[in-house]
């Protein structure tokens, strides 16, 4: 494209689109106690549904956003998705009902899928090969900083404007993004390159994927890994607040953990060529089983508050680190046999695993009882199931023709 924006500016714009989801989830964490006290004073755990309802909507939106952008263009889909995101944030800001807030968060999640999913398609429209990989890598490096600072940003907004101010910040964030894109980025998908939206093709792609044993198992393990991550996210703020009385310092600890866990993608990139994707996922899940069992045993002992807290922070880091070591590899395993329907396969994988993981994490989050035991049991169960499925995947691959 002759009018392509400068690469540095393009990377910054893409990183901001990527950041929409992380900002929408992690900045809400410091607000949960206030929302609970105001909208669900009889059941503090219900406030956690604000996170999983957004994730559920995001998963639903992921299924449709990619195909819609192939049919109607990249920018129109981002505009519509962002408009839904902003409108839903406005409803959440104004409502005095937890039920209406949860509905608004579902639709906000649906809208957030547009900038996140379509941004990757825009990169592919404008770049290819190693240059595309470089753009994605730089944008993802910037993106990994968002979970580290989002809770601190949320806490700052709460201090200035209360918990409703966070939804105003969502509206402002999205408005800046689409204004920037509208003024500076030309439509990257020419009309002659667009593909009609056909529901039968989407259904057939899903059928092909779930008929392939390796793809099917990979999606199941992805669901479990995301389920562990989302369950930790829903319970982590109450753990800091109620168990360890560290609500004030929670954003800083969360940022520290996010930065530490962010190194997982770099380690995976170093090891994956030598060890292979399946082996790394299997070993990571096995290590997580051992560490979670150790945490459960130590939690039953009479540890000092400082030692118990340090152990939990280490375990939280390990769960986040596990996600970084597994999700990319599992996506690659699932996509490998689906090259002929790559775009549709990416949408289906992301949608199915995210929706199912949210459906698992939501009820688990409601089991929080003032101890880490429900969280540890949930993580251990999902991790053990994932480890078993990865061993089963190895036997499947041994039976497949070379």
Image (cartoon, helix red, strand yellow):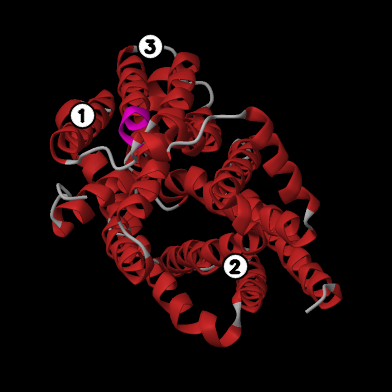
Above or below residue 44? Residue 369 is: below
Please state which of residues 209 and 388 is positioned toward the viewer in this rendering. Answer: 209
Secondary structure mostly taken by the magenta-highlighted segment of the chain = helix
Quadrant placement of the C terminus? bottom right
Q: Position of residue 170 (x, y in %)?
A: 27, 31
Above or below residue 78? Residue 134 is: below
Foreground tag (3 vs 1)? 1
Q: Write the residue at 54% across / 25% down.
A: 43
Foreground tag (2 vs 1)? 1
Please state which of residues 105 and 237 is positioned toward the viewer in this rendering. Answer: 105
**3D distance between C-alphas at marks 3 and 1:** 24 Å
Q: In the rendered image, which residue does mark 2 sit on?
A: 295
Residue 13: numbered disc: none
Q: Secondary structure at mark 1?
A: helix
Q: In the rendered image, which residue does mark 3 sit on?
A: 96
Cβ atoms at labels 2 and 3 below 8 Å apart: no
Q: Secondary structure at mark 3?
A: loop
Membership of 275 in magenta stretch: no
Q: Which residues are magenta?
A: 74-78
Q: How many marks do you count on the picture?
A: 3
**3D distance between C-alphas at marks 2 and 3:** 39 Å
Q: Position of residue 182 (x, y in %)?
A: 19, 33
Q: In the rendered image, which residue does mark 1 sit on?
A: 175
Q: Earlier in the sequence, mark 3 or mark 1?
A: 3
Cβ atoms at labels 3 and 1 below 8 Å apart: no
Evaluate whether residue 319 shows in this view: no
Q: Position of residue 209 (x, y in %)?
A: 72, 50
Report whether 97 appears left or right of 161: right
């Amino acid at each position: 494209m002759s009018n392509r924006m400068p690469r540095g500016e393009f990377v910054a714009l893409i990183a901001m689109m990527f950041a929409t989801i992380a900002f929408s989830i992690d900045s809400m964490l410091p607000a949960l106690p206030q929302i609970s006290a105001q909208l669900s004073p009889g059941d503090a755990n219900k406030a956690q549904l604000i996170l999983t309802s957004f994730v559920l909507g995001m998963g639903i939106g992921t299924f449709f956003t990619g195909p819609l952008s192939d049919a109607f263009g990249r920018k129109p889909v981002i505009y519509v998705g962002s408009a839904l995101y902003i409108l839903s944030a406005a409803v959440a800001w104004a409502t005095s009902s937890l039920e209406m807030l949860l509905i608004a968060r579902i639709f906000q999640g649906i809208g957030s899928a547009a900038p996140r999913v379509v941004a990757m398609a825009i990169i592919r429209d404008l770049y290819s090969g190693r240059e595309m990989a470089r753009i994605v890598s730089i944008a993802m490096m910037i993106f990994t900083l968002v979970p580290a600072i989002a809770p601190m940003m949320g806490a700052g907004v709460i201090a200035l404007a209360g918990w409703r101010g966070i939804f105003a910040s969502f509206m402002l964030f999205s408005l800046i993004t689409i204004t920037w894109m509208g003024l500076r980025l030309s439509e990257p998908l020419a009309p002659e390159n667009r593909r009609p939206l056909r529901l039968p093709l989407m259904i057939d792609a899903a059928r092909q994927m779930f008929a392939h044993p390796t793809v099917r198992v990979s999606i199941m393990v992805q669901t479990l890994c995301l389920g562990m991550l989302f369950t930790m996210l829903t319970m982590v703020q109450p753990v800091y607040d109620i168990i360890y009385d560290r609500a004030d310092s929670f954003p800083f600890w969360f940022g520290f953990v996010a930065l530490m866990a962010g190194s997982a993608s770099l380690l995976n990139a170093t090891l994956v060529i030598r060890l292979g994707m399946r082996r790394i996922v299997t070993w990571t899940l096995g290590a997580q089983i051992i560490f979670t069992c150790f945490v459960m045993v130590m939690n039953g002992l009479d540890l000092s508050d400082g030692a118990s807290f340090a152990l939990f922070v280490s375990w939280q880091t390990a769960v986040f680190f596990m996600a970084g070591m597994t999700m990319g590899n599992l996506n690659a395993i699932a996509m490998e046999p689906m090259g002929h329907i790559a775009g549709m396969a990416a949408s289906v994988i992301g949608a199915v695993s995210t929706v199912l993981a949210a459906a698992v994490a939501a009820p688990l989050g409601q089991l929080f009882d003032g101890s880490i035991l429900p969280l540890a049991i949930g993580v251990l169960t999902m991790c053990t199931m994932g480890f078993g499925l990865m061993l089963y995947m190895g036997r499947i691959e041994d039976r497949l023709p070379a």
